Amino acid sequence: MGNAAVAALVGRPATGPVQPRAVVQRAISAGQAGDVAHRLLEAMEGWGTDEDAIFGALSGRTRLDLSAITEAYEPISMNGSLDADLRDELTDGEYARAQTLLATAEADQPDLTPEEALAQRAGRAEDVAAQLDEAMSGWGTDEQQLLNALAGRTPFQVVAIARAYKDRTGRDLLGDLRDELSGDQLDQALGLATAMYRQGDGPEAEIGRLQQALNATHATTTQLRITGMFDAPTTAALTAFQAAHAPLDATGVLTLETWLALDAAAPMIARGGRVTITGGAEGDGRGVPVGGAIHPTLRRGSTGPAVEELQQKLATIPAEQVPTRVGADGDFGRNTRSAVREFQGSRTPPLPVNGVADKDTWAALDAVAGPVTVGREEFTSFERVEGTEYGGPTKFTWRLHPDRMEVTVNIRWTGAPAHPMVATWMQQMASAWNVFKMVDDDHPGTELPLQFVVGSGSPADATIQVTVTPPGGTPGRSNAGNYHTGDTRTSLAPHEFGHLIGLQDEYNTGPEQYTIITGDQPPIGTLDAPVVGGSPVPPETIAAEIRTAVTSSPAGQRGAKAQQVVATKYSLEQGAFAQRVGVAYEQANAGNMMRETNGVVAVDAAAHIEDDIAARIPGTSAQETDATTPFGYDNRSLMGSMDSFDTQIGEHDHPINERHVRHFAQLLGRNRPGNWRIAPR
């Protein structure tokens, strides 16, 4: 738990015989590009030029689309190129309009922020919707303008166009097409507008988006793997969604009507440096306490802020239930024990009257106690990272002051506590985390800064070993309990501080865990298979090679062999193709999948590929990390890959997210009246 050394785990360069893979964003197919090219030629050749048909064909295209169309047009052009023909056939004003449409696509750069990418997608859809509206307005219908505007659009683009058309006109696109066209032209238009996906299709990024949306709408109780393939589970989930959303036909075939319903139920958003679809519930970065208890067990002789919290809560219970009134002095003495016993005996049914504030007593007290100004949390939680379960402690104290909410973590530094990096690490923790405030919407102007204090008081909440890196030496791998002085990344200490307040890692996590923690669907990532010898490698082939590596002898060489297959030979990356390898692996080895839990390896039918790989490779190592990384998911947050800490993408890409401190807003809401929300300072 607490590995901060993840920056090198993502984005390895391809090595060996593997050829570069295509990116997720694709141009339209060669056939679609050729169709649009011929439509453009048809609009320009002959006695007259159909300018509107040209504008319809060029509107709302991506740069990749236009590149494919231009390439397809060149062999059939009249003057050597599309641009030359446009310049020859159009007036200066018309040519300028065509150039404006082309310039819109030129803005399609890979360094756009997610917000800009979504806005660009919406803008393109609006351009096409305007062409469709123009083609169907007035006394007649410009059939060629209409058909050209729809030609060569991907299903996902058609969904955006149909939504933009509804926003623009208040009418349904399919209904208007049926009203305006007939015969072959209607069949052609409906084919262009409704050509979606069915089982067996893929790999396509759009099918990955379909899987994300189905997961977000809880169309299935078992989360779909984001594979980009329209497989049987996707068909079943889609059928279930359609059946639950009349009047959709429950066919398991993706239609425009179905995707519009999905798009309304699970819209795309920009968050954390990605365009994504939410997971259907808020993300929860906190680990689940073992046994469910967040309070320490207290008894006579206990001292400290946890006792203060207990005493304050007992003081809010009516005197007829707890006659002994005690002050909040943080000392669990005779009177506090009496008050605990009285509270225990007043419950229905009564709790064991032993004067010990144990898990059940705390739970009963938390359920009925009034507001307090101090709290203490101490618990152990487990998380699964890189296929292996790790555990770690969380201890902190929170206090409500009139002008702030304060969260304190006291750290005991050992090994080399006077090393200059200790002061640097403490400053980095405080600087990174003190970026939020609580705002009371019921009382405008009422705010409380959320102040994290990195202390050194006693008793310590955490112990961190300071390991000095020799001059010229290579630092070891830092973790929650051991910092290397040569590890100078500014994200190290803030990341590990997140664990001290109860947060889980957000890198190399399984699909379900990723959604629970982040609140987002896993990204589509790398879609296509690696190419060897001119042919894409089937996922089943790679899965078999990995299995051979992790079951080979001697066991001590399994990590190196698995790393060679996954990272060196095929350069697998996180995303849809790696998930297809995972599915193939799990299906081929059903009934013999292993999982390591708290150091114990056992057969587990629910294990995923990364679990099995980690369980079969002895110990932990960088080789194991390389072999498991592609089959999990990383989030850009400080608790994930940490990319956003130093390379922010846009103003909405924050290294520390609202979910990371939501717990403290909930504590504030329970203990100080108001409608509190989290806001950046």
Image (cartoon, rainbow, N blue to C red):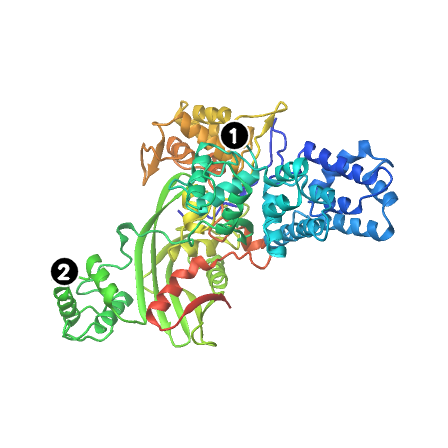
From the top left corner, tell me how far across and down residue 581 is, in percent: 48, 31
Compared to 344, does 468 lie above or below? above
- Nearer the observer: mark 2 or 1; the answer is 1
Residue 113 appears in the figure:
no
At 77% from the left edge and 44% from the top edge, which residue is drawn?
54
Distance of mark 2 from mark 1, alpha carbons? 59 Å
At 35% from the left edge and 72% from the top edge, which residue is drawn?
672
Reading the image, the residue beneath label 2 is: 351
Compared to 57, does 425 lie above or below? below
Give 158 or 534, whichever is nearer the viewer. 158
The amino acid type of the residue labelled 2 equals: Leu
Tag 2 secondary structure: loop
Residue 239 appears in the figure:
yes
The amino acid type of the residue labelled 1 equals: Gly
Compared to 596, does 94 lie above or below? below
Give 664 or 396, whichever is nearer the viewer. 664
Mark 1 neighbour density, 10 Å: few (under 14) some (14–19) many (20 or more)? few
Give 544 or 189, whichever is nearer the viewer. 189
From the top left corner, tell me how far across and down residue 163 is, in percent: 59, 51
* Label at residue 200: 1
From the top left corner, tell me how far across and down residue 166 is, in percent: 59, 53
Contact, CB < 8 Å: mark 2 with mark 1?
no
In this picture, residue 503 sits left or right of residue 326: right
Tag 1 secondary structure: loop
